[in-house]
Image (cartoon, rainbow, N blue to C red):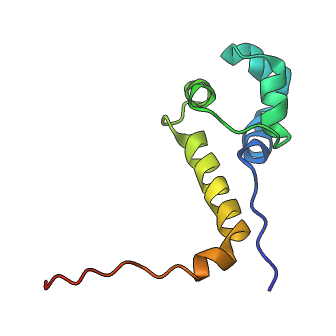
Amino acid sequence: MALLRNPHPGEILKKEFLDEIGMSQNRLAQAIGVPNNRIHAIVNGTRDVTGDTDLRLCKFFGLSEGYFLRLQNDYDVLEAKRRIAGQLAKIKPYKSNKAA
């Protein structure tokens, strides 16, 4: 079964935000006060979104705080789930012996 693609938050930042408003990565970096290479690395998927960057991006785009962190978390969880699926399948959930 083919797996669905798991887009990195940087891909979403580029396609859904920067491309939509026609803004360059360098201009965004300047607007939110971060080094240019930070935005480039996030867009290229080689750097994760941090709390600091999330707050800056959310303020700039008028989003609720945590928007990009939630994207990052969803991305990370799916990647981990795919990576350790075999190990997860062997874990038996804990069941209490206490009467309810």
**Image-quadrant location for residue 44:** top right
**Image-quadrant location for residue 47:** top right
User: Could you say which is closer to the camera, residue 84 or residue 63?
Assistant: 84
Q: Is residue 98 left or right of residue 34?
A: left
- Identify which residue is drawn at 60% across, 56% down: 74
**Image-quadrant location for residue 67:** top right
Q: Residue furthest front?
A: 97
Q: Is residue 88 above or below residue 14?
A: below
Q: From the top left corner, tell me how far across and down residue 83 is, in percent.
A: 73, 67
Q: From the top left corner, tell me how far across and down residue 68 is, in percent.
A: 61, 41
Q: From the top left corner, tell me how far across and down residue 96 is, in percent.
A: 26, 80
Q: From the top left corner, tell me how far across and down residue 54 is, in percent.
A: 59, 32
- Identify which residue is drawn at 63% across, 27% down: 53
Q: Is residue 68 above or below residue 92?
A: above
- Identify which residue is drawn at 17% across, 82% down: 98
Which image quarter is the N terminus in? bottom right
User: Could you say which is closer to the camera, residue 67 or residue 63?
Assistant: 67
Total labels: the figure holds 0
Which image quarter is the C terminus in? bottom left
Q: Residue furthest left?
A: 100
Q: Is residue 17 left or right of residue 70?
A: right
Q: Is residue 72 above or below residue 57?
A: below
User: Could you say which is closer to the camera, residue 46 or residue 56?
Assistant: 46
